[in-house]
Amino acid sequence: MPVTLPSDLMVSVSGLRGRIGSALTPDLTAAVVAAYGDFLRSEGHDGPVVIGRDSRTSGTMIARAVMAGLQSVGVDAVDLGVVPTPSVMLAVEHHGAAGGVAVTASHNSAEWNALKLASHEGMFLDGEASARFRARLAEQEPARASWDRLGNVTADPGAVDRHLGAILELPLLDVERMKRRRLKVALDCVRGAGGVIMPRLLEDLGCEVVSIHTKPDGFFPRDPEPTADHLAELGALVREEGADIGLAVDPDVDRLALVDQKGRPIGEDLTLALATAVVLRETPGTVVTNLSTSRVVQDVAEAYESPLVRTPVGEINVARRMQAEGAVVGGEGNGGVILPAVHLTRDAPVAAALILQYLMDSETSFSRAVADWPTYEIVKTKVDFDRERLDDAYAALGESFGDAETDSSDGLRLDWHDEGAWLHVRPSGTEPIVRLIAEGRDRPQADTLLERASEVLASLD
């Protein structure tokens, strides 16, 4: 039978995600992935499908269901085990695979898990491919294999080693000089998949590492999203150990957040800005980011006389535009850096290496190095709002903020260039909420935008 997806399963370009035992179950997983294996074959892509997972306690169960689904339609599976999502994407390319499945709910809390579906390019499905798959999922029963044509499962323990090798070989990095500098780095892996790669990367770069929560067992000690509100323990570690910098990753290691040498979070958007500066001073070129990313990334691009292009939120939207533009660097303001020289995938280990290069080249403290760039205050909140009424909300916001430049390619973005301020309102692709993001030259300016927008939405309830 074709698959009917439960209403409480979140379906977007970010994949299919839900709470374990409720929206997301092993039987649903096996059915969806069987259809995915059949879909890849129908698209002309033969070969195995690569599977990797983060450290969630449900990961083994869901990954086994993924393998069963693939085997049932005669597709071979390559099991990477617990690895970062970018390692999965690199492994798709390494194996010449038909596609990949990353079993991870990224920054969601531990009761969630998800299936992030990758194409043969080692990139998440784009909007068109995702629509074709969902249509096939709803309309067609996959062709099941007979007993003698079932898919096989093989293990590949080398994905992290290859990922590390690709980073350490980057011409942008002066690894030998970094080893001599011996930066002291505090690290928080939130007991996610970062524990299998981040300590090794930092040690390979000659860093002295002090760390918390590196055991990849999925028992997250805090909210796993690496936002400023969740980095107090890392900040304390930086101060106690006298570290030069603090690094925090999310459970599937595609986002990197930073803490300065005083233990203060400096904002996720600066991860992309500083990484971009390292790339552009060596290889000027186009930068691509999304509509919710800080203006400071634009400031960096302008400083190096490089164009900046904005896209709708979503890694695949940024990556596809990077392909089209031949971009040298890009990513999202949530701490996700994409470096095409490694792969067109958000990659926290790559971001960490670039940030350490930036700090070393600055030859000063991290807080002073960051102060080279303009300061903005970005404020994010989320509200419950009926998605069926979002068009009404956008119209009301446009009327209330009539002096702004508007962009409706992803929700509604209102921009006041001369004032250094903007507001972005859009439905989340990973949670059943609406996100409001505002930025200004100071906190009161950003807060005022959020308050006004919230009042407009509340008036429509």
Image (cartoon, rainbow, N blue to C red):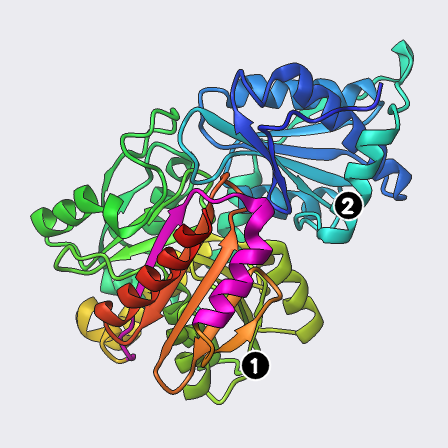
Query: Which residue is found at the position 24% from the left and 65% from the top?
Result: 181
Q: Which mark is residue 285?
A: 1
Q: Residue furthest left?
A: 240
User: Which x, y percent locates residue 56?
Assistant: 45, 26
Q: Is residue 389 magenta?
A: yes
| Residue 257 occupies quadrant | bottom left
Give left or right: position of 222 versus 418: left
Query: Which residue is found at the position 66% from the left and 22% from the top?
Result: 29
Helix, strand or loop at label 2? It is: helix
Residue bearing mark 2? 131
The part of the chain drawn in magenta is 373-400
| Viewer can see residue 176 | no
Give left or right: position of 51 versus 275: right
Disc 1: CA contacts within 10 A as few (<14), some (14-19) or many (>=20): many
Q: Which mark is residue 432?
A: none
What amino acid type is highlighted by mark number 1?
Gly
Q: Are marks 2 and 1 in contact (CB under 8 Å)?
A: no
